[in-house]
Image (cartoon, rainbow, N blue to C red):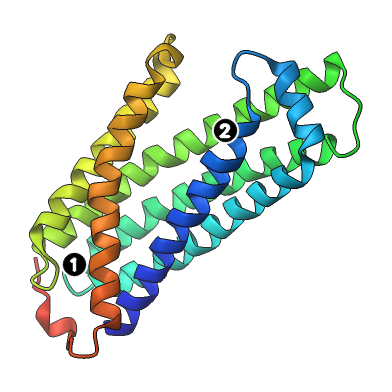
């Protein structure tokens, strides 16, 4: 349990850092939502930066897959069946995110030493739309994962119940934003609002869970085991 908490905490922390860098510091700085031409030009002129962002996303994916195993180990004593359900939906998220990264990888390839053209702009736009759509679907599955994980956390004696409640609120944020992005025609007009609906609960829920995992994992005086968990 202690080792699993350490692995999970470090994995979550690296996902936060890699995700912030790849998505906000790199990708969003290169994408101009009002101009496909500017976006394509940015991809061509800042190709190495795009590559580093893509690498950051791959790091996210790898540690996300690792969390499927480690979180299952932490929660299985509460309810093995529900832990399988939580793991299944996190796996679905990882698979959709992986498919999304192939879209971004193709965008990276076709803009290497490229000359901007109308056809290239159209293709880059299509690939970015595919990347965003696949990742959004994946995050809907991730939201379901968090709902189940939050329930398991609430039922656990070892983990503070407040963290479980915050994880459920995080899940609701992902679901609201994902559905709005997929089905709301004027989503871009309210993008900032929906992003805050995701970011604030996520920081409170997932980051607090990360801190708890790190404390449990690295605190030498902490003695945790499956007997501290309760069956449901």
Point out residue 184 in the picture as x, y percentages from the top left corner. Answer: 39, 14
Question: What is the CA distance from the residue labelled 1 to the residue labelled 2?
Answer: 40 Å
Which element carries disc 2, helix, strand or loop? helix
Q: In this orientation, which residue lies closer to the viewer: 88 or 206?
A: 206
The quarter of the picture where residue 168 lies is top left
Q: Which residue, given by chain and number where applicable, does mark 2 sit on?
A: 28
Discs 1, 2 touching: Cβ within 8 Å:
no
Nearer-the-camera pick, 61 or 78: 61
The image shows residue 198, relative to residue 19, as above or below, that is above
Vertical placement of residue 18 versus 168, above or below: below
Q: Earlier in the sequence, mark 1 or mark 2?
A: 2
**Count of labels shown?**
2
Q: In screen coordinates, is 103 left or right of 16?
A: right
Numbered mark located on residue 53 in the image = none
Asked whether residue 37 appears in the rendered view, the answer is: yes
Q: From the viewer's perspective, is 32 left or right of 192?
A: right
Q: Position of residue 35 (x, y in %)?
A: 67, 14
Seen at 68% across and 39% down, the residue is: 104
**Which of label 1 and label 2 is nearer to you?**
2
Q: Residue at x 62, y 29 (%)?
A: 130
Residue closer to the observer: 93 or 170: 170
Q: Which residue is denoted by mark 1 in the rendering?
A: 79
| Mark 1 neighbour class, 10 Å CA radius: few under 14, some 14 to 19, many 20 or more | some
Image quarter of residue 85 = bottom left
Query: In the rendered view, would you say 41 is above or below 215?
Result: above
Pinpoint residue 182: horizontal percent, then vertical percent: 44, 22
């Amino acid at each position: 349990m202690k080792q699993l908490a350490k692995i999970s905490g470090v994995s979550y922390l690296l996902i936060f850092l890699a995700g912030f860098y790849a998505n906000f510091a790199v990708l969003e700085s290169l994408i101009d939502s009002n101009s496909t031409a500017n976006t394509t030009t940015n991809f061509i002129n800042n190709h190495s930066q795009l590559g580093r962002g893509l690498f950051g996303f791959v790091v996210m994916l790898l540690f996300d897959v690792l969390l499927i195993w480690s979180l299952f180990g932490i929660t299985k004593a509460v309810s093995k069946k529900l832990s399988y359900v939580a793991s299944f939906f996190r796996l679905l998220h990882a698979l959709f995110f992986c498919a999304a990264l192939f879209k971004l990888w193709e965008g990276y390839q076709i803009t290497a030493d490229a000359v901007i053209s109308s056809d290239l702009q159209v293709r880059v736009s299509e690939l970015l739309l595919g990347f965003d759509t696949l990742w959004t679907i994946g995050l809907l599955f991730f939201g379901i994962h968090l709902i189940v994980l939050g329930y398991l956390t609430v039922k656990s004696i070892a983990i503070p119940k407040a963290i479980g409640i915050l994880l459920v609120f995080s899940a609701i944020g992902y679901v609201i934003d994902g559905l709005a992005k997929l089905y709301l025609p004027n989503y871009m007009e309210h993008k900032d609002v929906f992003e805050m609906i995701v970011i604030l609960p996520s920081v409170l829920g997932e980051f607090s869970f990360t801190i708890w995992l790190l404390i449990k994992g690295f605190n030498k005086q902490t003695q945790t085991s499956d007997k501290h968990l309760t069956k449901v």
